[in-house]
Amino acid sequence: SDKERNTCVANLTGDYFGTGMMAADFFLRKGYTRFAYYGYPDTIWMRERGEGFRKKVQDTGRPIYMFNEDAYRNPDEKWSFDANAVSNWLLNLPKPMALFACDDYFALQIVEACKMNDIDIPGEIAVLGVDNDDLLCNISDPTLSSIELDVENGGYEAGRILHQFIEKKISSLSDVVINPIRVVTRKSTERY
């Protein structure tokens, strides 16, 4: 389920909250004082990434702007991209802005909306995604900075736990948590 972690079975999940905190730390070290998050609250990974980002930013006393999807989104069109709604939100954000998107696909939406509205990336809005998807990050113009996740190690850990379960060395399966590794910087955050 992408809504919540399942309590009845093992989950292949992530440290989503920690990923959001890593994004905030990255932008704070770069000297930003305004922050925005783009993602929806209806999936656990989007919600927790946004919560981690918001918590870290709010702990510094700085403002954070969250995309109000309820004002723009048709609930029957899950994950639809409303370019006009996103454009209006971006145009009304104070600049310069550090914007964290819940993943690379959503970050690419931000980049495209900025291009449609002549918003300079990274001069006016610096954009950071998650997953470090080589294709999405490199087709973006400018290229997209992204948080790399330890997915390969997560796959090995899932296999190890499953093997132990089959061999009856453990009696129940535990969650496998994919951790963020680092921020891979590209042009979308290279303002300074």
Image (spheres, rainbow, N blue to C red):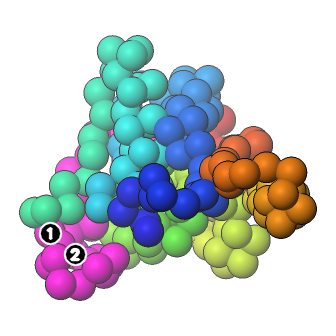
Judging depth in this view, the residue of 119 and 27 nearest the camera is: 27
Residue at (58, 28) in percent of width and height: 25
Farthest bottom residue in view: 77
Is residue 24 in the magenta section?
A: no
Residue 94, how many percent across, how many down? 28, 40
Q: Which residues are magenta?
A: 72-98
* Residue wearing tag 2: 84
> Counting other residues with Cα less than 10 Å from the Cα at mark 2, is it few (<14), some (14-19), or many (20 or more)?
few
- Residue 72, horizontal then vertical, whole percent: 14, 69
Task: Say whether marks 2 and 1 touch (CB < 8 Å).
Answer: no
Quarter occupied by residue 35: top left
Distance, label 2 to label 1, CA atoms, is 9 Å
**Left or right, residue 93 beside residue 168:** left
Amino acid type shown at disc 2:
Asn
Q: Nearer the viewer, residue 106 or 118?
A: 106
Residue ID for mark 1:
72
In terms of image quadrants, where is residue 26?
Answer: top right
